[in-house]
Amino acid sequence: MKQHGATALTLAGLILLAGCTTPASERAQAPVAVAEVGSFHIGGRQVTLDGLPAKEVRFTPTSPLTRIDPNGEFEVGQMYVQYVRLAPAARRAPYPLLMWHGGGLSGVTWESTPDGRPGWQMFFLRAGHDVYVSDAVERGRASWARYPELYRSEPVFRTKKEAWELFRIGPAGSYQDAAHRSAYPGTQFPVAAFDQFMKQGVPRWLTNDAATEAAYDALVQRVCPCVIMVHSQGSTFAYTLANRYPDKIKAVVGVEPSGALDPDKVDLTPLSRVPLLFVWGDKIAATPRWQGIQAPMKKMIAALKAKGGRADEIDLPARGIAGNSHLMMMDANSDQIAALVQDWLVAQGLAGR
Amino acid sequence: MKQHGATALTLAGLILLAGCTTPASERAQAPVAVAEVGSFHIGGRQVTLDGLPAKEVRFTPTSPLTRIDPNGEFEVGQMYVQYVRLAPAARRAPYPLLMWHGGGLSGVTWESTPDGRPGWQMFFLRAGHDVYVSDAVERGRASWARYPELYRSEPVFRTKKEAWELFRIGPAGSYQDAAHRSAYPGTQFPVAAFDQFMKQGVPRWLTNDAATEAAYDALVQRVCPCVIMVHSQGSTFAYTLANRYPDKIKAVVGVEPSGALDPDKVDLTPLSRVPLLFVWGDKIAATPRWQGIQAPMKKMIAALKAKGGRADEIDLPARGIAGNSHLMMMDANSDQIAALVQDWLVAQGLAGR
């Protein structure tokens, strides 16, 4: 049954859903008006395998042997992108927000935290951004290809010990085994959910950077102008592409970015026109490996500032926010840090209140 | 700034968003009021690897060799689940809808179609269902584990030729190579997007059924009572679990389900209490391989009916709907078929208008 007053009331409801007249505190649990949830793969190419021997396999334990010919045509090198687009009345940011994950991880990084709280995907949706969460080439729903025929190396699987120490949940040497591991006192990481976190880890190759960059490039062509939020190992791709397309990439938020461009090798003039934010957690100064990771980034930041670029750093412990791990989007105070990022985006004119 | 009229107006807006007073045709493009988008991993266990040799690898082409110890603790056997929960006022179904994919595929099956139209995930969200789209063990964001140390076999990668013919886009022998392939005249599959579809394929193992069933079991414990929609190879797990938990699983919608329970080996009495729908596309009768896949399902259906169970079949060509492939949720008339499924759910009291 059609009601004549429906359109006006719907619009009023949408405006209220969008939170235009409600403070952020009331918005936190309010519904979000979503126009579409969807996904696509982008990048990649066809490859053909031939000359491999056929195999006999059983598709179930009780079925007869079936001959499988592994030769033929495949798609490789694509990445996966899932978007949540807001209704126009709910959108309060001029550009979509692309969330790129780090090494050995997938877009799940940005979804619910391992202990089940809403993640940054949801935070930035509520804050009025269209959000695109992706899985880079070889990760998660992007799929992966045979090795060594197509990928040139074996994958690397991250152990719990490596993750615990590399992500600064505890110091080097603090992880003996799952029954004997000690976190930093006061860590913000939800330690009881560490094993749950490890379920989201994915294998990683070390020989796919060119394909990954090509797929990200195709994504930028398709979706941008945009803002990129990037974690850790994904940052090399984000800075490379922002330096290539400074007019398409309106800002890069680096969440403990680990891959810098070297100003002695790359002309960073285009990148110096892109506003950059760097967010650093706790215990970096106390961790030689992280000092080593951070040093090239500090060099890049200094070079960009020398060119007049905006390269703002939020050093959380220096602001009195202690205990954040490398996985600050999963930490107990994840919303507090997201709010600092959102404030910075607002200051750049890239988000609304 | 707080407004006193806000709550009432928001509720009015939500009710309208929920479509309670608008016909389905107007609802199609209306925003959906979403309470939360989130995800979790479920199932799995810790395993420990030891005795493997260390490797020397380069993390980037220019970085020094780094020694990697592959031994340690890992999580294996988990699956990935992403949910979109509607605002209460937008929900018109009593139970969440779980969407399980088929072999060599992931939850992407249910998202946007390869040619970019909204998929069944979006259709059933708009129809008022909370929707849980998952990636089974070893697929997509569920991640996978080393073989042969943890998984007992090598994975299988599906060629384009196999997909083209197995999914009945063209008949057996119709695919020579990407430049020489012919589809069935009148196919509903978006043939121009076939290569795009192939980007969503993922490797498949043939030795993980026990772990997959265990993870699905854990999902049912966590999320159900529920309705399960399942495609192709996922159906073995759906029917097994519905037979185990007939009070938790309120219905199973089988979209060309390919794995039946054998009534000569399994007591189907519990399953006979669960309403089942089977949807069949075109060209099955003309395809010996599909006749072979369908025959055990027909046997199961007959056995359930003999027990007084509800096992309804929608044979699309028999209804005058021609040209559907095995991937009917991606076909050009995907919304038409989704609407038939939704009608059936309404008739079972499992969905609202």
Image: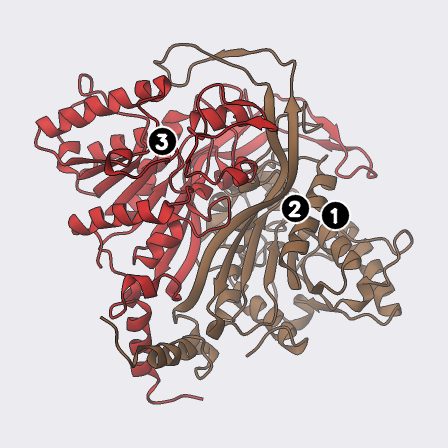
Chain colours: A red, B brown
**Residue type of the residue flagged with mark 3:** Ser
Residue under label 2: B166
B58 horizontally vs B251: left or right? left
Residue at 43 percent of width and 58 percent of height: A37
Element on which disc 2 rests: helix
C-alpha gap between disc 2 and disc 3: 41 Å
The part of the image, by quadrant, that contains residue B143 is top right
Element on which disc 1 rests: helix
Residue sitting at the far front: A185
Residue A263 horizontal/vertical position (percent): 18, 21
**Residue type of the residue flagged with mark 1:** Arg
How packed mark 2 is, by other alpha carbons closer than 10 Å (few <14, some 14-19, many 20 or more), is some
- Which mark, by number, is residue A306? none
Element on which disc 3 rests: helix
The chain that hosts pointer 3 is: A
- Which mark, by number, is residue B289? 1
Residue under label 3: A232
Q: Front-most of A284 and B336?
A: A284
C-alpha gap between disc 3 and disc 1: 48 Å
The part of the image, by quadrant, that contains residue B205 is top right
Q: Front-most of A202 and B233?
A: A202
Q: Are marks 2 and 1 in contact (CB under 8 Å)?
A: yes
**Residue type of the residue flagged with mark 2:** Leu
The nearer-to-camera label among 2 and 3 is 3
Residue A47 horizontal/vertical position (percent): 49, 30
The chain that hosts pointer 1 is: B
The part of the image, by quadrant, that contains residue A229 is top left
Q: Is residue B293 visible?
A: yes
Instruction: Work out which quarter of the rendered image holds the C terminus of chain A and state it.
Output: bottom left
